[in-house]
Image (cartoon, rainbow, N blue to C red):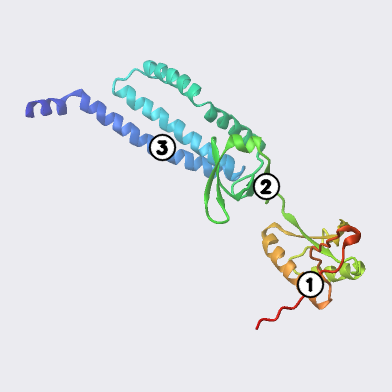
Amino acid sequence: MYDTLIDFLQSAKLASFLKAGALVLVGLLAARLLSSGLYRLMLKHTTPHHCTLMRRLVYWLVLSLFIASALRELGFSLGVLLGAAGILSVAVGFASQTSASNLISGLFLVGEKPFELGDIIQVGTTRGEVLSIDLLSVKLRTYDNLYVRIPNESLIKTDMINLTRFPIRRFDMRFKVSYTENIARLREVLAQVARNTPLCLEEPEPMFLIEGMGDSAVNIQYSVWAKRENYRDLRNEFQEKALAAFMVADIEVSIPKRALYAGKESGSFPVQMIQKD
């Protein structure tokens, strides 16, 4: 056994193993350096989304070349490996049509750029910040700090809302008031609240809209604009100030009312006080 070990250490196989290991280590280092350098270079000219995808592509491409060289150093035939890889790819392709669909959908997302890293999007009932945009899926972090993975195919087939695409957003406060309220006075009260709220933008100016006449109230919408980073604070502050202004101005926000009518036989409901002994 000792002689066998000595023969192995003195043989060409050990040198091949050492060269193969060195090639893999150099490949890991080269792939990391090249991909990181390309990422920093591209970041000056394009979006982080495209930079991240290109960095991963360059990393695996460079590493694959070094791994192929290491296998060749060990005596493996690259032609046989490529043939086996081709057969395996066909088999995997038939078995993973969903992954292929997600891959194609990911390419469409890369070209269309409906959102970028850091954007807040909503897909169905899921809303969160975009953490990663990969070729198979998009990763989100929701407002309650949950990690959500959404397949790219779902993003292509489903309506997607980008909440932070534009620099400003509009907040719509909808409520109902009684038919006896003075609409002109209500409009002025809301305008005063908007002027006293620093987060409200003057341009576009606030909008007062009568949405329609309801069964027992007038439906009102008052819209104000804010920078997208101030939207949440504006929504809370404006509604708080509006409710306080309504109380000061004695403006009644209507609540649903129902009247029961049973034809000509309808009468007053009898009320009887029962006193316990």
Give coordinates of residue 169: x percent, y percent.
74, 55
Q: Residue at x 41, y 16 (%)?
A: 83
Mark 2 falls on what kind of element? strand
Q: Earlier in the sequence, mark 3 or mark 2?
A: 3
Q: Which residue is mark 2?
A: 162
Q: Nearer the viewer, residue 169 or 259?
A: 259
Q: Is residue 212 above or below residue 273?
A: above
Give coordinates of residue 160: x percent, y percent.
67, 43
Q: Amino acid at mark 2?
A: Asn
Q: Residue at x 49, y 37 (%)?
A: 56
Q: Is residue 264 above or below residue 29?
A: below
Label 1 close to label 3 by CB (< 8 Å): no
Q: Which residue is mark 1?
A: 196
Q: Earlier in the sequence, mark 1 or mark 3?
A: 3
Label 3 close to label 2 by CB (< 8 Å): no
**Cα–Cα gap, marks 1 and 2:** 30 Å
Q: Amino acid at mark 1?
A: Asn
Q: Quadrant of the C terminus?
A: bottom right
Q: Residue at x 23, y 27 (%)?
A: 15
Q: Quadrant of the N terminus?
A: top left
Q: Earlier in the sequence, mark 1 or mark 2?
A: 2
Front label number (1 vs 3): 1
Mark 3 Cα shell of 10 Å, populated few (<14), some (14-19), many (≥20): some
Mark 2 Cα shell of 10 Å, populated few (<14), some (14-19), many (≥20): some
Q: Which residue is mark 3?
A: 30
